[in-house]
Amino acid sequence: MSSNALAKLIGFALIVLVLITAAAQSTYVVQPGFRGVQVTLGKVSEQFKPEGFGTKVPFVSTILPVPIRQLTRELNAECYSSDLQQVTVRLRVLYRIPEAAVVKIFQDYAGDPFDSLIAPRIQEALKEVTALQSAEQIVKKREEIKTRSLASVKQKIGDILYVEDLVLENITLSKELEAAIESKMVQEQEAAKARFTQQKSQIEADTVIIKAKGEAEAIRIRGEALRDTPGLIQLQIVEKWDGKSPLVIGGGENTGTNFILPLGTPASSPPVKK
């Protein structure tokens, strides 16, 4: 092969390579859950690219992906309570970049607004909320702290992106303060137990008194009924009679003594003296 033919072959191969490279550089694919931002010679296009396949100017334009699905980041916040106790809050932040703000977020925050926009606002919101509560209340009112902090963060950030939730994973106090809170809780539980025992004893004592008063009242009413109605005694005797007539035997002449022998009484049983 002559040198002239070889040169032509090399030139043709280079042209084919350039065309293939240009074709590859003139297309792009935006994956699901992302939007594309087009940068041409350092200038950002005002319109984002939707997900899917598209074409662009080769070599001078670049399509950079920006996520619009929900993202999660972790954060530690150092705060102080109203009683000047240091509180460390560990939390997860769930946020999302709205589609309409993709280009602005890319221009202002290089596509990742967490460190420069979200984290400082969350730190600020948590410090404002915890400063109004004692350290003990911060631990007890975790859900309230989260709700108020989330509302404050949304107000501070606005619509440029959505902070969808804050998950407070852990609230850490100093060891001395944790021991003091635990001791206080134990004392409160013991006091509550003592109050319960006292109330139970009082109820039992009141029950005994009420029962005794009821029995005394029943005895009084029964006594008055027997006094006012003598025939009631005879009625009760009749009601309890088993239908057997007693046998009365005289004790002898001039003795004035009689014996009552109930019917059915065994012969060995002694007679009843009347």
Image: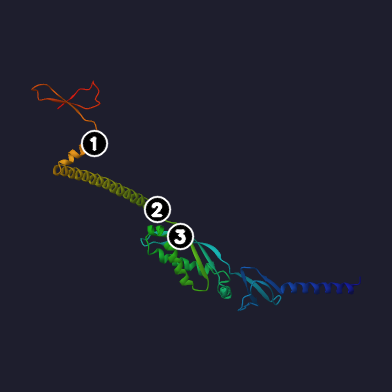
* Residue drawn at point x = 37 percent, y = 53 percent: 181
The relative height of residue 166 versus residue 248 in the rendered view (above or below) is: below
* Residue drawn at point x = 33 percent, y = 51 percent: 188
Give the residue pinned by disc 1. 240
The relative height of residue 174 versus residue 250 in the rendered view (above or below) is: below
Please name the amino acid that badge 1 sits on: Lys
Q: x, y (%) of residue 159?
A: 51, 74
Q: Residue furthest left?
A: 254
Q: Nearer the viewer, mark 1 or mark 2?
A: 1
Q: x, y (%) of residue 59?
A: 70, 75
User: Residue 73's image quarter?
Assistant: bottom right
Disc 2 is placed on an element classified as helix
Q: Nearer the viewer, residue 33 or 125?
A: 33
Label disc, if present, on residue 89 of the rendered structure: 3
Marks 1/2: CA–CA distance? 75 Å
Q: Of callouts 1 and 2, which one flags the residue occurring earlier in the amino acid sequence?
A: 2
Look at the image and tell me in which quarter the N terminus lies.
bottom right
The relative height of residue 260 versus residue 122 in the rendered view (above or below) is: above
Q: x, y (%) of residue 148?
A: 43, 66
* Residue drawn at point x = 18 percent, y = 38 percent: 234
Q: x, y (%) of residue 92?
A: 51, 61
Give the residue pinned by disc 2. 178
Please name the amino acid that badge 2 sits on: Glu
